[in-house]
Image (spheres, rainbow, N blue to C red):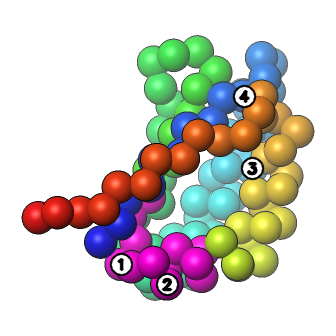
Amino acid sequence: MISIVATIRVKEGCEADFESVAKELVAAVNANEPGCLFYQLHKGEEPLTYYFIERYENEAAIDTHRQTDHFKQIGGRMGPSMAGRPDVLILNQIS
């Protein structure tokens, strides 16, 4: 199994817009991607910082996720609220 933590910083004043669109993405992923075992949005203690916590069965499920229309379309709508590219940490489960 593979986990991903995507850290996203948003522009000040854009939190509500970002959260609204990000929640759409969470719903679409959870409804349409059986290889994705967990996909949730979290807000960090640091202001303007959000985290997508994701868990996939395998690399193929990650590839599928990245190619879906909902990831491309809804994810693209988050861009104007973001203060830069996400920082992505990929974790391979050991046990």
Q: Secondary structure at mark 2?
A: helix
Residue 93 forms part of the magenta stretch: no
Image quadrant occupied by the C terminus: bottom left
Residue drawn at x 83%, y 66% as measured from the top left: 73
Q: Residues within 10 Å of mark 2 (few under 14, many from 20)?
A: few
Side of 66 relative to 39 (left or right): right
- For marks 4 and 3, the one nearer the N-term is 4
Front tag of 4 and 3: 4
The type of residue carrying mark 1 is: Glu
Label annotation for residue 60? 2
Side of 32 relative to 72 (left or right): left
Q: Are marks 4 and 1 in contact (CB under 8 Å)?
A: no
Image: 40 above or below 16: below
Q: Secondary structure at mark 4?
A: loop
Image: 47 above or below 91: above
Q: Mark 1 and mark 3: span between their CA atoms?
A: 25 Å
- For marks 4 and 2, the one nearer the N-term is 4
Q: Residues within 10 Å of mark 4 (few under 14, many from 20)?
A: many
Please name the residue that numbered disc 4 is placed on.
10
- For marks 2 and 3, the one nearer the N-term is 3
Please name the residue that numbered disc 1 is placed on.
57
Q: Secondary structure at mark 1?
A: loop
Q: Are marks 4 and 2 in contact (CB under 8 Å)?
A: no
- For marks 4 and 1, the one nearer the N-term is 4
Image: 48 above or below 4: above
Residue drawn at x 63%, y 36% as measured from the top left: 8
